[in-house]
Image: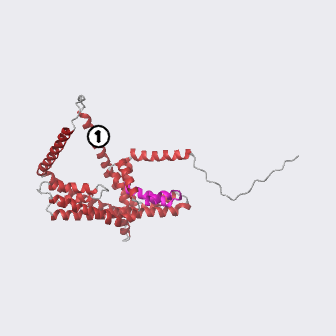
């Protein structure tokens, strides 16, 4: 006797998406950890390469402009790199001369700085004695001090200094060559990069690379313009109030004013130190703090959004997190590279369908 079978009801509901397996998530976490570890242990190589890429994007318009006059790209790249090197050498030479003069007259500034430090120390001691009189502490037996080898601190300082000098030497040695090769062989590198992707994706990759180039070039040019404006305005202000070494103080203060969040505090320190040997009243120092604070507000709220913000399209939270992370990972160079790296990640995420939510979050 045959059993009757009931046909299964037909439904038009789409299949439910399958949640990603725990193994895939673990692999992604491991891959991210490996990338971060590589960036940490190979910091010198990665930072040198990224700085070279930024400079190459910055000089590429000049090379293309020279090509319009029938100049070979290799020669144009050499001329552009030579002009940039000469400009940096000239600025460094002027800065060295002013720093040398400042070091020669350092005893004149050392006495008022020592006096201010002693006054602050005496005030702190008076506050401490007052606190002891109000709430006397319970007598405690002092713990025996363990002698520490004096050579350990010196050894650590020397090792840290040697590491920093190695990074500077590595960058100064390889960056010019890397920039020259990137500029001279741009078309070959571009063609080779396109060959890494399937033909169906090359159009999207080309558009993404062009957007990254426009963004990085605009970021560098915009920051250079803002820093130049701050340096000129600060130098003129220091010259008007009669501060010693107005050009040196304006150069240092203007560039420090570009540091995110801490720029105002850092920019005030150099003119305050120089002004201790010249001003006897409080009003010049208040003028310095007030004017530099005004410059910082104008730069952050007017110049940077107009000249830089339109290129990177990052929100304040993403910028803050990027500065904290890359600054922790690479130090001062990380602060310089944090925004370009994050903005590049946003451009890539905007062009990849699966990563578009991340791009929207970075630019929200």
Count of all numbered marks drawn on residues in the image: 1
Residue 348 appearing in the image: no
Q: Nearer the viewer, residue 152 or 192?
A: 152
Quarter of the image where one finds residue 98: bottom left
Q: Is residue 186 magenta?
A: no
* Residue neighbourhood size for the residue with mark 1, other residues' Cα within 10 Å, grouped as few (<14), some (14–19), many (≥20): few
Q: Is residue 348 magenta?
A: yes
Q: Position of residue 302 (x, y in %)?
A: 32, 66
Q: Main SS of the magenta segment? A: helix
Q: Nearer the viewer, residue 89 or 364?
A: 364
Say whether residue 4 is left or right of residue 298: right
Residue 52 appearing in the image: yes
Residue that mark 1 sits on:
159
Q: Nearer the viewer, residue 125 or 308?
A: 125
At a point 12% along the width and 48% down the height, the residue shown is 115
Q: Position of residue 73 (x, y in %)?
A: 38, 64
Element marked by disc 1? helix
Q: Nearer the viewer, residue 49 or 254?
A: 254
Q: Position of residue 199 (x, y in %)?
A: 55, 61
The colour scheme used to paint the residues is secondary structure
Relative height, residue 152 to residue 258 (above, below): above
At a point 41% along the width and 56% down the height, the residue shown is 342
Say whether residue 31 is left or right of residue 17: left
Question: Which quadrant holds the C terminus?
Answer: bottom left
Quarter of the image where one finds residue 59: bottom left
Range of residues picked out in magenta: 338-364
At a point 48% along the width and 58% down the height, the residue shown is 349
């Amino acid at each position: 006797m045959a059993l009757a079978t009931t046909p299964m009801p037909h439904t038009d509901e789409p299949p439910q998406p399958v949640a990603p397996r725990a193994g895939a998530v673990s692999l992604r976490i491991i891959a991210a950890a490996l990338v971060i570890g590589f960036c940490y242990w190979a910091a010198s190589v990665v930072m040198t390469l990224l700085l070279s890429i930024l400079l190459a994007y910055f000089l590429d318009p000049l090379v293309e402009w020279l090509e319009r006059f029938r100049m070979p790209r290799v020669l144009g790249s050499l001329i552009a790199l030579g002009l940039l090197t000469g400009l940096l050498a000239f600025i460094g030479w002027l800065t060295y001369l002013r720093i040398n003069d400042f070091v020669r007259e350092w005893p004149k500034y050392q006495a008022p700085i020592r006096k201010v430090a002693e006054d602050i120390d005496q005030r702190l001691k008076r506050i401490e004695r007052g606190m002891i009189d109000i709430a006397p502490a319970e007598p405690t037996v002092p713990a025996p001090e363990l002698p520490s080898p004096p050579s350990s601190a010196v050894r650590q300082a020397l090792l840290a200094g040697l590491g920093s000098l190695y990074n500077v030497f590595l960058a100064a040695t390889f960056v010019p060559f890397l920039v020259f090769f990137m500029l001279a062989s741009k078309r070959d590198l571009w063609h080779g990069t396109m060959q890494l992707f399937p033909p169906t994706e090359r159009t999207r990759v080309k558009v993404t690379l062009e957007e990254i180039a426009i963004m990085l070039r605009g970021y560098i040019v915009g920051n250079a313009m803002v820093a130049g404006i701050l340096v000129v305005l600060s130098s003129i202000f220091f010259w008007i109030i009669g501060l010693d070494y107005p050009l040196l103080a304006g150069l240092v203060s203007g560039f420090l004013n570009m540091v995110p969040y801490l720029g105002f505090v850092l920019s005030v320190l150099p003119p305050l130190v120089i002004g201790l040997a010249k001003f006897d009243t409080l009003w010049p120092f208040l003028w310095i703090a007030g004017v530099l604070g005004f410059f910082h507000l104008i730069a952050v709220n007017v110049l940077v959004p107009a000249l830089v913000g339109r290129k990177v399209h990052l929100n304040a939270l993403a910028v803050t997190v990027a500065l904290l992370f890359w600054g922790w990972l690479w130090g001062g160079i990380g602060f310089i590279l944090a925004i370009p790296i994050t903005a590049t990640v946003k451009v890539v995420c905007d062009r990849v369908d699966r990563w578009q939510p991340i791009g929207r979050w970075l630019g929200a």
